[in-house]
Image: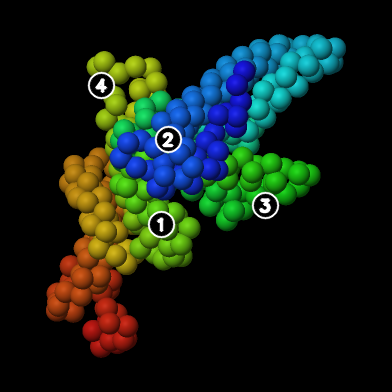
Amino acid sequence: MTCASDLRPTAAETAAALVFTTDGYSDDDGVDHVTAAVRSVAAAEAQASEWDVAEAEYLRAAEASDDASALEVSATTDDVVEEHGPVHDAYLEARSRLMQTTAPHWAAIGTKADAFLRMWGDDETSRYARAARRLAEVAAKIGKALPDASDLIDVMSARGHAEQLCYYLAHDDDGYRNWAVSLGGVGKIASEAETIALETRQLARGNDAQLAVSATVVGAVWFSDKRSEGDDVENLSDQMSTAIREASLRRPSASTTEIERAARGEACIGEIEDRAFVRRPTTQTGLAFQLLVAAGEIEVAQFGTVGEQKEVAAENIRTALSNAIRLMGLPFDYRTAEFYLGKRLCDLDGRRRAGLQQ
C-alpha cells in the first residue's frame, strides 16, 4: 500500500508554489504545480485509506474483545480468561494503531473519542469523560463532510468539547490526579486527549469562520476566569441550550437513539434549573439566562401542587429580580425593595445601611 509520506509534495514544489504563474508552472526551476497538486490530493486520499483500514481493524477487534469479556463474566474457571488473552491483546494493538492514525474527517474524531472513553472513561461521571462523550456525538453528527462544508455551530461545539476534555483532565481532581497512581497512565491519557484536540483544531481550518470560532473556543476554555461567579451561570446557559436541542428530538418519528438523547436532555434541563440560582451572575449574559429560567419558575409557583416546590420557585424568582437590579445598577427605594424582596438589596453599593435593615 502506498504510504502517505511518499506522495507528499517535495520542499522544492512547496516553495515554488509561492511564485505560481498564470500558465500553471513556476518560475523556480520550472516545477509543474499541477503535479504538485495531484501529489497533495493523493497524499490526502492515502491518509484516508490508512484510516479506513485502521478503523475497520479496530471495530472488529473491539467487538471480539467485548464478546470475550461477556463470556468471561459467566466463566467458572480462569482458563477461559487465559484463552482470551490474545483476543484482548489484538484489541489493544488495533486501538493503538487507530489512535496513532490521523483522523481525516470529523466522523473519525468521533470514533477516536469513543475509543478514548472505552479506555479512560470509567463510568463517565467525570467532566472530562462527559466532554469526550459530547465530542463523540457531535463529531459523528458532522460526519465525513468536507471540513469547509461542515456546519459552523457543530464545529464550534465539537471544538469546545475537545478543549474541555483536555482542560478538565488538567484541572479536575478526577482527571490526571486520579490516574497518577497508574504507572505511565497519565502520559498515555494525555497523549491521546491532546492528539484528539490537535486534530480537531486542524479540521476546524476549513474556512476563516471556523478558524475564528476555533480560536475563540481556545480562549474561552483555557484563558477565561473560571472562578468568576458570572462565568458559572453563563456556562449553564450553554449547557441548557444543548439540553433543549436534545430534548427536542422526542417526536413521533424519533429513532431509539434520538429518544435516549431526548431523555438525557430532559433530565439535564431539570438539573440545570436547580443550579441556575446558586450563583449570582456578574455579566448581562448570565443575568439574562437566570431571568429566563426564573420565568419558567412562575408556572411552578402559581400552579404547583407541592408547597415546598412552590416556595422554592418563588424564592428563585425573587433572587433573579434582585440580581437584575443589582447588576444593572437600577435606582430603587430601599423600603419598597425590602417590602417585596426582603433584605436582598439592602447592601447594594457595598455600604451597610443599618437603619434600613431594622
| Side of 199 relative to 229 (left or right) | right
Q: CA distance from mark 3 to mark 1?
A: 23 Å
Determine which quarter of the picture holds residue 155. top left
Mark 3 or mark 2: name the one nearer the start of the chain: 2
| Side of 29 relative to 194 (left or right) | left
**Residue that numbered label 4 is attached to:** 251
**Residue that numbered label 1 is attached to:** 220
**Residue that numbered label 2 is attached to:** 33
User: Total label count?
Assistant: 4
Mark 3 or mark 1: name the one nearer the start of the chain: 3
Instruction: Tell me where residue 164 appears, x and y as whole percent.
Output: 49, 48
Q: How is the image coloured?
A: rainbow
Res. 315 mark: none
**Secondary element at tag 4:** loop
Q: Amino acid at mark 2?
A: His
155 or 263, nearer to the observer:
155
